[in-house]
Amino acid sequence: MIEIAEDSRKKVERALLVGFRFPDQSEAEVNEHLDELADLVRNLDIVPLEPEIVNLHLPSPRYYIGSGKAGEIARLMQECEADCLIFDTPLSPSQQRNWERLTHSCVIDREEVILDIFAERASTREAVLQVELARTKYSLPRLTRAWTHLSRQHGGGATTRGEGEAQIETDRRLLRRRIRQLEEELQVVRKQRETQRKSRQRNLIPHGAIVGYTNVGKSSLLRKLSGAEILVKDQLFATLDPTTRRVPLENGLEVLLTDTVGFVRKLPHSLVEAFKSTLEEAVLADFLLLVLDVSSSQLDAQWETTLSVLKELGAQEKKIVIVFNKVDLVDRETDPVLFARLRGLFPDALYLSTRTGEGIDALKERLCAIAAEEFQLMRVKLPPQRHDLAALAHANGRVYEENYNDSGELELVFTIGPALRHKFREYAL
């Protein structure tokens, strides 16, 4: 039944977008949300038509809006020859069904758009499982959409079930079974990821997570810092799977940086839950690089969305380095107010361009300071009777060089945390 719905979706070429303005919202805010929805829709190769904004005080149970306005939108769909109706707010399964009966067209909401994008972009086993789990849970209460072509009743008996109803019950059981299987498979994958994290922790290298709104340049930044080949695309949700790379710094220091999935306004809660193990890189990291697009007209909204998601993940108390990317797209001479305002709000923020390389060295210096604060590089010469300290360095630090001299002394170069540095100071070189 899911295949039927997906096959019909592929025929959609033009979509009418519908947004809602409540009394406490400005028209500009609603337009920003619809602009973002249009960008999301384009990622599915669907052309968004001029959006329709509905002023609303309270949602209605049948269509979310009144029947009269719903009829107007249905007529507008026909006039503009739209193949699909896309709402910028979550619809209940019954509201979705009512709209599809009214318009005789495909009707979806923002959540389903994001789910479809995630399904196209997922590549690793974990991401594929997470997306399938989220989509399956989303589809479960909406099965009747796929089976309305089947008869619902044969005869007049109250206990008589039609072909469609029997098929729906069968599919519900199959979907519930699939949900259990996916959750079990995800548990196995999460254990494997936990083992990988423990391995990183044993290396005792400071670990940072690059977080921020989607399409602000997080992957570009990781590629610039690490020199590694990483997928970089100018599209929403280009990166769904966490990518970790080693970043070498001055004085033999280094950090690990992980690129995480980008945030977006109105991110479906089901996806926040489904991608918890991906996003929890931000929770488990020692520090965060919070990247913002300084050239975006929606900079304030992106900042609020990023903080909101970090708060939901419980990561808002981490050490955060704020990075404003894409400074090459802003004329600082003609728009000095923007930078003056940002410097007043974020005095410790860094400004850079991953395209031109401006500000990258300053960011590396900041990362160096973080790494040195957490794990200081030490050079020591240990006497033969202090092999206990050599063992301590191996167990709790990262050893880079280890040589014995002619006197039997051990020369070590290693990084160690602040709690144990005092044990080595009298032997420091």
Image (cartoon, rainbow, N blue to C red):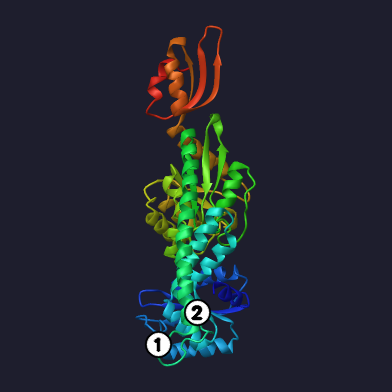
The disc at residue 87 is none
Residue beneath the point at 47% across and 25% down: 394
Residue 407 visible in rendering: yes
In the rendered image of this protein, does residue 188 appear above or below residue 3? above
State the residue at coordinates (61%, 78%).
Answer: 12
Quadrant (top left/top right/bottom left/bottom right) for the N terminus? bottom right
SS for dot 1: loop
- Residue 3 falls in image quadrant: bottom right
Q: Position of residue 247 (x, y in %)?
A: 56, 39
Measure how far apart labels 2 and 1 are at the Cα level: 22 Å
Q: Which label is found at residue 66? A: 1
Nearer the observer, disc 2 or disc 1? 2
Tell me the residue at 48%/59% (across/down).
181
User: Which of 334 and 377 lies nearest the eye of the viewer?
Assistant: 377
At label 2, the amino acid type is Arg
Q: Residue furthest right?
A: 229
Three-letter amino acid code at the position of disc 1: Gly
User: Element type at marker 2?
Assistant: helix
Extreme residue toward the bottom, this view: 156
Query: What residue does disc 2 label?
Result: 145
